Structure formats: C-alpha cells, structure tokens
Amino acid sequence: MRLRMEEFIREQQKEIVRELENIDGKKFRVDTWTRDSGGGGTSCVLQDGNVFEKAGVNISVVYGTLPKPAIEKMRADHANIDTNVDSLEFFATGLSMVLHPINPMAPTVHLNYRYFETEKADGSPTAWWFGGGTDLTPSYLFDEDAIHFHKTIKDACDKHDKSYYPRFKKWCDNYFSNKHRGETRGIGGIFFDDLDESEKDQENIFEFAQSCLKAFLPSYLPIILKRKDMPYSEKEREWQQIRRGRYVEFNLVHDRGTAFGLNTPSARVESILMSLPLTARWVYMHEPEKGSREQRLVDVLREPREWV
Amino acid sequence: MRLRMEEFIREQQKEIVRELENIDGKKFRVDTWTRDSGGGGTSCVLQDGNVFEKAGVNISVVYGTLPKPAIEKMRADHANIDTNVDSLEFFATGLSMVLHPINPMAPTVHLNYRYFETEKADGSPTAWWFGGGTDLTPSYLFDEDAIHFHKTIKDACDKHDKSYYPRFKKWCDNYFSNKHRGETRGIGGIFFDDLDESEKDQENIFEFAQSCLKAFLPSYLPIILKRKDMPYSEKEREWQQIRRGRYVEFNLVHDRGTAFGLNTPSARVESILMSLPLTARWVYMHEPEKGSREQRLVDVLREPREWV
C-alpha cells in the first residue's frame, strides 16, 4: 500500500501541475528534497503567476521515529495509538495542495490526501489509516461555484458509500473552523481522518481516496476558468487580503496538519508553510457593510449551508 | 494590588498613547469594552498612521472562571496551580502593546506587563504573580539601537536586582523563538513569568514591574525618532513584509499569551490579534543574499548576542 499510494500521488501531482501550468502560463518551480531522518518529497510551487499568487502541489513520503508532540497531532481520535509513549515508528505519504489565485473573485482551494502507518499500541505490527479532504475558500461567494464544487465531490463519494458525503461534509465544517472567530474558514467540502479497517477494507478505502483526488480537477478547473479574468476593484482586493489573514489564522492556530508538520523533526518548513498566502492583511475592527457581498460571505461562514 | 496595578497601567496607557500620537500626528481610536463573563478593558489602536502602520496599546482587567485549555497557557511553570482541575477562578490585569512602524528601518516593539491571581491548588485563598517583558524586532539591524534598547532595560532591572537582566534577557531569547525556523523573533529584551513570593515580596515585584514599564518610552522613542524618516527601497519594504510574516508565525504558533487569550471564554479577539501587523508576506524559499544586511539580521537571530 505504501508503494501504491506513493505511485498514485506522484502521477496525480504531475497531472495537476500540468493542468495548472496550462491555466497560468507560468511554470512551477520543482524542489526535490530528502529528509535527514528518513524519506523526502517533491514540492512544486508557482509564485507570482498570471493567475495564481501562490500555488503549491507537494508530495512527501516520510518515515522514522516520531516524538510525542507530533504523535498527539497525527490522528483525530488516537484510536490504536498509544499517545503515552515518548516516540513511535511511523510512515506517512500524501499529496498536499493549496492554490491562492490573484483575482479576489476566484476562490482559494485546499486539498490533502494521506496514508499513515504506525506501530500499534498493543504491540502488533502496524496500524494503517487514510485521511484527507478538500475545501473551498472564496472571498466573494458565487453560489453556483459552491454548488458545483460540492456536487463534484459528492458524486465521487457516492460511488463508494452514500454515507460518506454527509458525514465528511459535516466533519469538514467542524474541522476548518476559526473557533476564536465563530466562523468557518471557507464554504467547506469534505474532511475525514482515521479511515481504517473498522470502516472498510484497505483496498476499498484506497479506491475511495483515489476517487476523491481524481475529482479535484473537475471540481476546481471550471471555477478558476470562470473567475480568473473577472474585473475587480482595489476594495475587493483588500477584502481578499483580510480573508487571507483569516486563512493564516486557521492554518497556524488550529490546523492539526500544520502542527504535525512543524513538530516533526527535520521537517521541511518551506513545504509545510507553502499553504500560507503570498500576502495577508489584519485590519483592526474591520466590519463589512450591512447587506454587502462581504457581509453575505461572513453570514454563510457563521452558519454553514447545505450546497447539494 | 489589583486596584493599584490597574491604576498604574491606566496612567501608563494614557502617557504612552499621548507620546505616540505626538510622534505620529494621528490619533488613536479608543474602544472601551466589557467582557460578558467579568471585567473589560480599553483598546487604543492607531492604524494607517504617518509613522505607524499599526499600533496597539491595550489594557484589560478580567476575572471569572477559566477553562482547562486557558489554565494550561496561563503560567510558565504551573507551580501553585492545579492544572488537573476543569476550571479555576482567576483575576488578570495588564498592559499589552505592539507597534509596527511603516519604515522598514524602524523596528517593531512589543511590551506586556501583567498581574495574575488564582485560587491555589492547596485550597488557600490566592496565588499571585507578575509576568511580562519587552522585546525589539527589527527588519534591518542597527547595533546602536539594539544596544540602546537593552541598556535602558538593563538599567531599569539593575535598580532592583542585578540578577534580573541576565536571567530575563536569556528567558526572552528562549521564549520569543520561532523554533520551527531555528531563529528568534527579534533581537530580544527581557521576559519573565511567575514572579511571586518565592522570588521577593509583592511590593518589591510591583516596584520592579513599574520600573520596567516606565522604561518603555526612553527605550523606544529615541529609536523611532531616528528611523522613522530614513529613506528605503521597495526591496527593503518587501523584506520587512517577509519579517512580518515571521512575526505572525511566532504570535499564532508559539505565543502563550495569544493562546491564553484565544482560549479564554468571551475574550475580545480584536484586542488579542491587534498584535498582528497590518500586512505580511510569505515568499516560498526566500533566501537573503550572502553578505547582505538581510543576511546579517538572520545570522543574529540564529545566534542571540549580548548587547550590553
């Protein structure tokens, strides 16, 4: 499974990078790196592009010994992991992507699918699980984009299990939440973690993860193509910058994946923090005008909606 | 002590705000707020000024019941606090300040002095302690500024105890550290926490905290006056924006004060996050040129220096 997942995400990385280069017209910078304590990865980053302010499509395959602070961030429910140990042998591979477009009418998108193995708490050789998801973060909300994004993901989920989309949609709204602000990061998508043998057999879950990842291009490309050249004002660009500040808040304060990365010894910080936007803004006491498009977005972030 | 500390920081807030308005030429916005679960504060914020991009000088007096996640962030060593309880009665008052100047040659400065009381773990009525400090974060390093800043603080410390400055200078370098980057946030200053009866009597420590806070204006004003009108290039402004990104990383990933605030129920998020700069930038794989002034700063942040 380690090798199959790695091969799959490598292919997907190539295909996604190729499609995004077609749209942007600029090439990704490709950095292949190795990790002192085991493994490595390939980071593809496009910065200051024509369409994307910053776009990262990274894969990594890392293994070795994990210290306690990272163990605690590794998994949502910690089932099958003894978090009371000082260290743990692990293997992790996954693809992570964040795209921040320049145009404030075009939404930021995030995606991550990963496969983990560790030694089990009961001493038996390995526990394994899949995790991941994808979510959309607009500065200006177009209902049709939200519907298209959610519908494409729902179709991918439904092929495997009709319970997946509703469960993982809710999990996404709960997870990508700036609790200190009382608002979600964006308009959601799906998120799941700890999908293991208690859910379905490994082959089954791998197929599900593959469907999800393959659904990315059809879920996002029509949206970016429709929005990338829309006209916008300086004021709309400023609102986007404020929303980017909220994105940074979520990633640095709440995101377990970022915390896991920053707590993993000899982690590649530049690859972990490629998720941060090129620019962001924090305006004291900024309040959108009543009845404005900005206010409408905030209303939806305060009370997540059903889109399909 | 609660009332005396509150009165002292109110006076200091007024004096500092007055001096900063003289320098900037623009007025602070003053927001007085009350906290649903007990207490309140006064936030003074100047944004888009002539000298300061963003400047906040806040005081707060809050009390009530603290939940577990906040208890764990409240104190460095947790001595005298039973962190195994689900909640705890507390009182906290303090002044917090962060100034982000526009000119990249002028350093950001942070200051916070606070007084805490809680019920003791052994059931006796109260534990009390003082905490705080101040530190300087330049984008471009002028040795004379670092020396002046540290010397002014050292003089304030030395009046009370010759051991304070060396101990608290080291504590500051250790605390304001972006561990994931292997660099400190800035060129330091002092930081201390948990100063209580095991150190000196309450009167004594209160006098020390007063001296520290009174040393702020003489420590920073000569620096900002010297730097605020220096010429700078677009490239230097960009480097400042990258350093501001690191400032955000520290505050959101590592700062215990911010985490304490965000985990305190009915906290005023806008007052806590006024510490974030108006604008910040994350450039993938940015590397300063060898031998440049930018590189020299990074070298010092990697290996903190003695300035006096």
Image: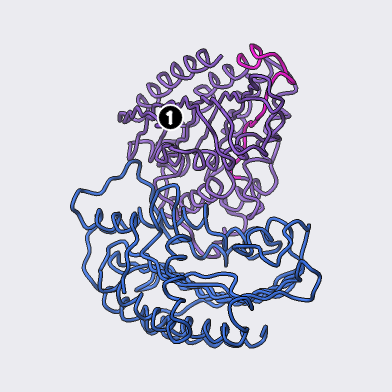
Chain colours: A blue, B purple
Is A198 placed above or below A207 here?
above
Percent x, y of residue B167: 73, 29
Which residue is located at x 35 percent, y 30 percent? B24
The residue where tag 1 is placed is B57
Give neighbour class at mark 1: few <14, some 14-19, many 20+ (Cα, 10 Å).
Answer: many
Which residue is located at x 39 percent, y 32 percent? B36
The quadrant in which the N terminus of chain B is found is: top right
Q: Nearer the viewer, residue A183 or B68?
A: B68
Q: Which residue lies furthest to the left in this view?
A: A291
Which residue is located at x 19 percent, y 48 percent? A290
Type of amino acid under label 1: Val
Looking at the rendered structure, the secondary structure element under dot 1 is strand
Percent x, y of residue A25: 37, 81
- The answer, for residue A200, to whether it is visible in the render is yes
Percent x, y of residue B69: 58, 43
Q: Which chain carries label 1?
A: B
Is A109 placed above or below B85 here?
below
Membership of A239 in magenta stretch: no
Residue A121: image quadrant is bottom right
Question: In the image, A105: left or right of B45?
Answer: left
The residue segment tinted magenta is B185-207
